[in-house]
Image (cartoon, grey):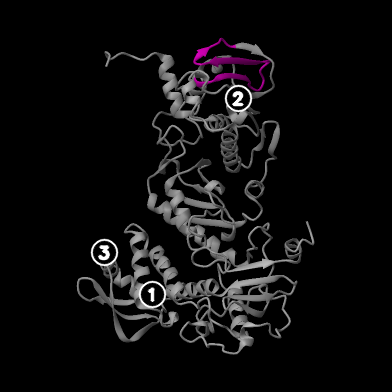
Amino acid sequence: MGRIRLLSDATINRIAAGEVIERPAAAARELVENALDSGATRIRVAIAGGGIDRVEISDDGCGMDADELTLAVQRHATSKLSDETLVRISTLGFRGEALPSIGAAARLSITSRPPGADSAFAIAVEGGALSPVRPAPGGFGTRVEMRDLFFATPARRKFLKSPRAEGDAVETAIRRLAIAAPEVAFALELDGRIAFDLPAQSRAARVAALLGPECALPIEGVRGEMTVSGYIAPPSLARATGAGQILVVNGRPVVDPVLRTAVRVGTRDGVMNGRFAVLALFLTLPAEDVDVNVHPAKAELRFRAADAVRGLVITAVQRALAGGAVGIAPVASGFAPRPPMAFTPSPRPHAAGPRFAGFGQFSEARLPLADNPAARAPVAAPEPSPDHPLGAAVAQVLDTYILAVAADGTLVLVDQHAAHERLTQEALREQRLAGLVRAQALLMPEVVELPHSAVAVLLERAAELAEIGVEIEGFGPGAVLVRALPAALGTPSPASLLRDVADELAEQGESTALDTRLDAVIARLACHGSIRAGRRLNQAEMDALLRQMEATPRAATCSHGRPTFLRLTKTELERMFGRRL
């Protein structure tokens, strides 16, 4: 090891550049943030070779004069901090690192002209080597061009992905910024192809344009000085990755773990495990309540009241899905999503009365066994009513799926267990919120043997479980005594039910809010109290199940996020049979 020495400025700048500009998407994001901070109303982004070869950003912002251009490419020079306390940061950028970092890692040129100036000026930086400012042709605003990223550090360039992968990352970054600032016109060009070209528009229109028109269920919530708003798509349209989740805090797109966890918890009741809801979520709170100076990329934050933020987001997202997902109809796998079905839910009873009237007729314990083969064969079904979007039941297939026909001729397939699981969950949830969960005492209390850790978790939460009708007590070192279960579940196996509940409580952990823990447990209970696949239903039972689905929130998915029903239109059936391309 050699003697301690100071590194050269060029080496220092290249090391710092690696923290800020790790790939083309980071450079593009930093440059667009500068354009937004400049007050631009129009921003155009063009990239070539995935951004490795070229990234060009043009805007109509305030521009810079010759002296400001010289300062702009020096490290930690910025116009965005009114003081140096780093407490109330209201701009996207503030560190003064982006331009010098890009100049150290690539070939950078900037041409800018402020309003009222007679001409534009330009400056260039290549691998940290600065050229003098010179007059140049150019309109009002700023044009920044970055070429040959990491040409000065070839070892870093080898770690970049393919141009296509890097280009996709650039597009994702620009889409996030475009959604965060819908009042600004945005255009993105990828290797000569226009990815999008959007005018200044409303937030709803921008979200629809970039995330799809289905992302339209409103998210709203207020807690003190914090507000959350945005839009979310129905759970049935969840994606395999989180690329469709746009999280914005005080106008800044972020990938903050607190918010991502809150969204996951808020959507877990309707989105299948391993998939991600599509949403654009905008959180606004006082600048002093959030620290954006956590990482050079400024994508992660530190909230002063993280628990309050998490709770607000979870509640708002859950409310959004509860209020709108009931009318969204899933489609068969491989077909394009269709617009929400237009229907008017059946009138609900007064809040003081039982909302799920007739619910008990589907209880596993009370469900009549239909021995008549007609219960699972085509029957003379009533004429479908336009008021019933799930149609009239005509058959039960494989003693598992209900076949129905809607008034418009649409074929509807319902998974009876998944559908009834949702009905059970919503009934238990409603009863819990009203304090009316009825426990059914077992004829003979049952001893359930479990691992010591599971017993400890259950007994620690025994008071909470009693709120939802599960009454237990300790019975030796490795067992619990089950005295009662929720009446709405019928007669499930206490042993398998308690094992699932213990797993759920262990997964939730101590820090999870009580309401969230109980809702998660209710979801587990619902699976044990629902009619099973293989249970025959008669005509009245099938139709009653369809009507309950139409009047129940979140009925398009089960507790695990799987679809409860599929629709096949005439067009889709014709495509399946090769009658239509």
> Residue 48, how many percent across, how many down?
64, 28
Disc 2 element: loop
In this image, 412 relative to 38: left or right?
Answer: right
**Is residue 480 or residue 511 the one in the foreground?**
480
Disc 3 element: helix
**Vertical position of residue 93 compared to residue 524: above or below:** above
Residue at (50, 84) in percent of width and height: 360
Name the image quarter holding the C terminus. Answer: bottom right
- Badge 3: residue crowd in 10 Å (few <14, some 14–19, many ≥20): few
Q: Which residue is mark 3?
A: 453
Query: Furthest residue to the left?
Result: 476
> Which of the marked residues, 3 or 1, is nearer the chain's N terminus?
3
> Identity of the amino acid at label 2?
Asp
Quick check: is 124 in the magenta stretch?
yes
Q: Which residue is mark 2?
A: 53
State which region is magenta.
105-133
